[in-house]
Image (spheres, rainbow, N blue to C red):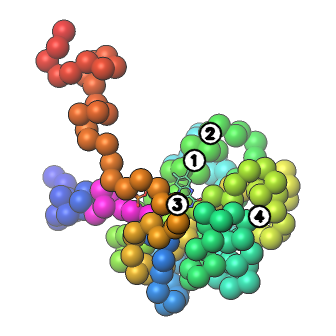
Amino acid sequence: MAAVANPREVTREIRNVRQARLYKPDPVPEGVLNELLEIARWTGSSRNTQPWEFIVVTDREQLRKISQLRTPINWVADAPLAIAIVLNGENPLSEAFDEGRVTERLLIGARMLGLGGGTAWFGDDAQQSAAKQILSIPEERTARSVVVLGYPTTTKDHRPNPATAGRKPLAELVSHERLGQGAGSS
Ligand SMILES: Cc1cc2nc3c(=O)[nH]c(=O)nc-3n(C[C@H](O)[C@H](O)[C@H](O)COP(=O)(O)O)c2cc1C
């Protein structure tokens, strides 16, 4: 038996999780934020190391400083809230994977709760160092991104140089038994 009453509705919502960059000014209610932080806390990680800490950022000046690290994330300035993911910096490969997992769970959780979200990357080593200074993160830790959350006004990529929309068809992505092999071939 499915875990929820209408599983297709849930999977459709997961499939429709998009990157939101423009938000209403409304704040994220504390109860919603706590629910999302619980989702983050319960995310699985390599050997259950839980190699993360989370910084909740709502201060306008902090958000503005983060937004100025790189032009492609300038929209962060007008978002109501961002959660910075701070990693231990001990196992770069598995921590990158763990960061992806926690990010996606936050984005899915946000959608389920009627919000939207987006990931914003700080950029190269120098830009990551600048982000660490803004957020008082020691240089030896890893900090690459924030997950931005709020009530979106659109999920259209409004930037002058938008990312390509849509997705490749499954026929281009899926093989059977061996790479490039269609179903039923031997
Ligand atoms: C590793 C990674 C880094 C990203 N960095 C940024 C970023 O710096 N700025 C931004 O606006 N979107 C960023 N994105 C969001 C992507 O542009 C977005 O996931 C992609 O265009 C698909 O968008 P859609 O789900 O709305 O179709 C990033 C996504 C990933 C996975």
Tell me what residue is drawn at x 25 percent, y 57 percent: 11
Mark before the other along the chain sequence, 4 or 1: 1
**Disc 3 element:** loop
Tell me what residue is drawn at x 19 percent, y 54 percent: 2
Pinpoint residue 46: horizontal percent, then vertical percent: 58, 41
Q: Which residue is mark 2?
A: 94
Badge nearest the viewer, 1 or 3: 3
Mark before the other along the chain sequence, 4 or 2: 2
Q: How many marks?
A: 4
Q: Which residue is mark 1?
A: 98
Tell me what residue is drawn at x 42 percent, y 78 percent: 152
Taking the view exactly as shown, the residue that stands out farthest to the front is: 160
Q: Which residues are magenta?
A: 13-19
Q: Identify which amino acid the numbered label 2 is placed on.
A: Ser
Pinpoint residue 21: horizontal percent, then vertical percent: 49, 71
Q: Identify which amino acid the numbered label 3 is placed on.
A: Asn
Taking the view exactly as shown, the residue that stands out farthest to the top is: 186
- Structural distance between the alpha carbons of marks 4 and 1: 20 Å
Instruction: Pick whichever, 100 or 183, lies toward us.
Output: 183
Q: Which residue is mark 4?
A: 131
Q: Which residue is mark 3?
A: 161
The relative height of residue 22 versus residue 2 in the rendered view (above or below) is below
The relative height of residue 30 versus residue 128 in the rendered view (above or below) is below
